[in-house]
Image (spheres, rainbow, N blue to C red):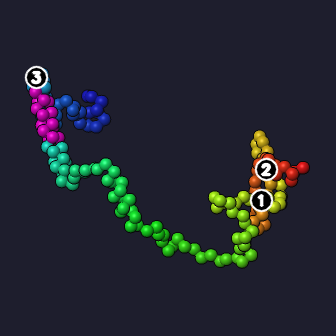
Amino acid sequence: MAPFEALYGRRYRSPIGWFEVGEAELIGPDLVHQSMENVKIIKERLKTSQSHQKSYSDIRRRDLEFKEGGTQASVSNEMSLVHLVFHVSMLTKVVGDPSSIMPIETIEVNEELSYEEVLAAILDRHVRKLINKEIASVKVLWQNQQAEEAIWEADDEIKKKYPHLFA
């Protein structure tokens, strides 16, 4: 008994011989001839199904024509009608704090509509110890900020910019 037959309780059906269980086995040229006929049938059925799929996709397919420079301009024209909007659900209620409002005259804005932050005070120092090194940080209060808005900066960078504070 073959191992497959012992395990599954039936004979193994080889992909070479597509005969049904119980049919007499073909040997020699008859086996090759039957296999060739079965391969021809399979090829014909695959070709038929491929042509069906092609006809289904050809119905929905259309030829595209492009003109040089024409598509970009038409897309820009279509997008010009679209407004930049956002949904109301993105809005949140803001409770203003009058003490946090800065008068605009105190901020000097340059030509690029930006301003340079000026260091007002160093509020605290802290050293974080890692496994193999230590990182020194300072809590910095900038000129146009409240004390609650003070941030931690790297000690080295502040020493480079403001050496007179560490002398």
Amino acid type of the residue that numbered disc 1 sits on in the rendered structure = Val
Q: Is residue 26 above or below residue 106?
A: above
- Answer with left or right where residue 22 lies relative to residue 111: left
Q: Nearer the viewer, residue 129 or 20?
A: 129
Q: Nearer the viewer, residue 46 or 62?
A: 62
> What is the distance, in whole Å, between disc 2 and disc 1 at their CAs?
11 Å
Position in image of residue 150 (x %, y %)? 76, 62
Residue that label 1 marks: 118
3 and 2 marks in contact (CB < 8 Å): no
Residue that label 2 marks: 161
Q: Which mark is residue 56?
A: none
Amino acid type of the residue that numbered disc 3 sits on in the rendered structure = Pro
Range of the magenta residues? 33-47
> How many other residues sit within 10 Å of disc 2, few (<14), some (14-19) or many (≥20)?
few
Q: Nearer the viewer, residue 148 or 18?
A: 148
Closest to the camera, between mark 3 and mark 2, is 2
Q: Residue at x 77, y 48 (%)?
A: 157
Task: Give SS at disc 1.
Answer: loop
> How many other residues sit within 10 Å of disc 1, few (<14), some (14-19) or many (≥20)?
few
> What is the distance, in whole Å, between disc 3 and disc 2 at their CAs?
93 Å
The kind of secondary structure the magenta stretch mainly shows is helix
> What is the distance, in whole Å, between disc 3 and disc 1 at their CAs?
96 Å
Residue that label 3 marks: 29
Q: Residue at x 26, y 28 (%)?
A: 1
Position in image of residue 58 (x %, y %)? 19, 50
Closest to the camera, between mark 3 and mark 1, is 1
Task: Give SS at disc 2.
Answer: helix
Position in image of residue 156 (x %, y %)? 79, 47
